[in-house]
């Protein structure tokens, strides 16, 4: 049986940075599920489907072929044959991802892909519903968060580092809007699984968080 580590939490909590480092340390595969919703969002944008048009999303999502590949250990998302990794990291793509993540048919399609990946290999998977819905039997579940101000500043620094001009207040507003949408949708809203460890990373370094989760993983693996 493969070992699954589920990491959920709001936007900007540091999930992908932590999950990637943790996967490297443990020799597991990192699965970024947000990237799949972002790719689906790109697909709808290309079709000129607006954020509010959930009816069109549920009809058209079946024609989107989303595949995952790995290059130099980095996850690549392939949308209908095109590698869209370079397109999915904008704030707009994040908002569109959050909008289409409300749609039942979109979620069913992507959850199926996520569960298949977790069956094949030991994974660290991050997202919003991994511990509650995608991998309910994961051996380790983490709910990672940080204050809104800290999350906005981290996201802002990341965007500037990539050369994307932005305003801190706007980034914070986007994060609040996305949290609201992700926590209040009908299907698989973001919430802490009952058996998840709660970690507030506002005052923690990346290495401290990785060490803490790696310790939990070690104990969980020994138990199995
Ligand atoms: O983690 P991220 O910022 O890349 O995710 C983008 C959006 O995708 C997020 O706002 C909500 C949605 N999402 C989701 O609903 N379920 C997941 N497992 C992962 C992401």
Image (cartoon, grey):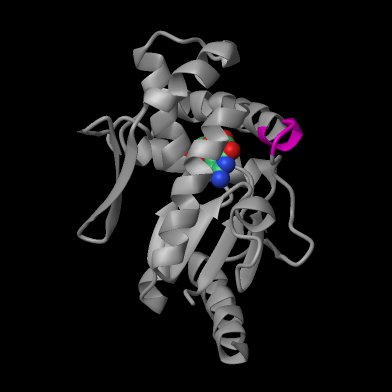
What residue is at 49 percent from the left and 77 percent from the top? 1
Q: Is residue 118 left or right of residue 52?
A: left
Residue 80 in view = yes
Compared with 25, 137 (above or below) is above
Total tally of numbered discs in the picture = 0
Position in image of residue 149 (x %, y %): 65, 41
Q: Is residue 165 left or right of residue 103?
A: left
Q: Which quadrant of the render holds ligand 1?
A: top right
Toward the viewer: 73 or 154? Answer: 73
Q: Quadrant of residue 201?
A: bottom right
Position in image of residue 20 (x %, y %): 41, 61
| Residue located farthest toward the right when viewing the structure as drawn | 194
What residue is at 52 percent from the left and 12 percent from the top? 56
Q: Quadrant of residue 64?
A: top left
Magenta stretch: give its range: 182-187
| Residue located farthest toward the bottom when viewing the structure as drawn | 222
Q: Is residue 111 left or right of residue 78?
A: right
What residue is at 73 percent from the left and 37 percent from the top? 183
Toward the viewer: 197 or 199? Answer: 197
Dividing the image into 4 quarters, which one contains the C terminus?
bottom right
Magenta region includes residue 36: no
Position in image of residue 175 (x %, y %): 61, 33
Q: Is residue 151 left or right of residue 86?
A: right
Residue 156 in view = no
Position in image of residue 134 (x %, y %): 59, 53
């Amino acid at each position: 049986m493969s070992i699954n580590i589920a990491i959920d939490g709001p936007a900007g909590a540091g999930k992908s940075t932590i999950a990637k480092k943790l996967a490297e340390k443990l020799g597991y595969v990192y699965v970024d599920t947000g990237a799949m919703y972002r790719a689906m969002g790109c697909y709808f944008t290309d079709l000129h489907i607006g954020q509010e048009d959930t009816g069109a999303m549920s009809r058209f999502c079946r024609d989107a072929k989303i595949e995952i590949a790995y290059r130099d250990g980095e996850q690549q998302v392939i949308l209908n044959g095109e590698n869209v990794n370079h397109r999915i990291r904008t704030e707009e793509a994040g908002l569109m991802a959050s909008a289409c993540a409300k749609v039942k048919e979109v979620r069913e399609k992507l959850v199926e892909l996520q569960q298949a990946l977790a069956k094949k290999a030991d994974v660290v998977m991050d997202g919003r519903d991994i511990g509650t819905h995608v991998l309910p039997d994961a051996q380790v579940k983490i709910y990672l968060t940080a204050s809104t101000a800290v999350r906005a500043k981290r996201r802002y620094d990341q965007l500037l580092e990539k050369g994307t001009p932005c305003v801190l207040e706007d980034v914070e507003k986007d994060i609040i809007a996305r949290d609201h949408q992700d926590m209040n949708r009908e299907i698989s809203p973001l919430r802490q699984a009952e058996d998840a460890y709660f970690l507030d990373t506002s005052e923690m370094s990346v290495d401290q968080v990785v060490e803490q989760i790696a310790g939990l993983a070690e104990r969980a693996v020994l138990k199995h």
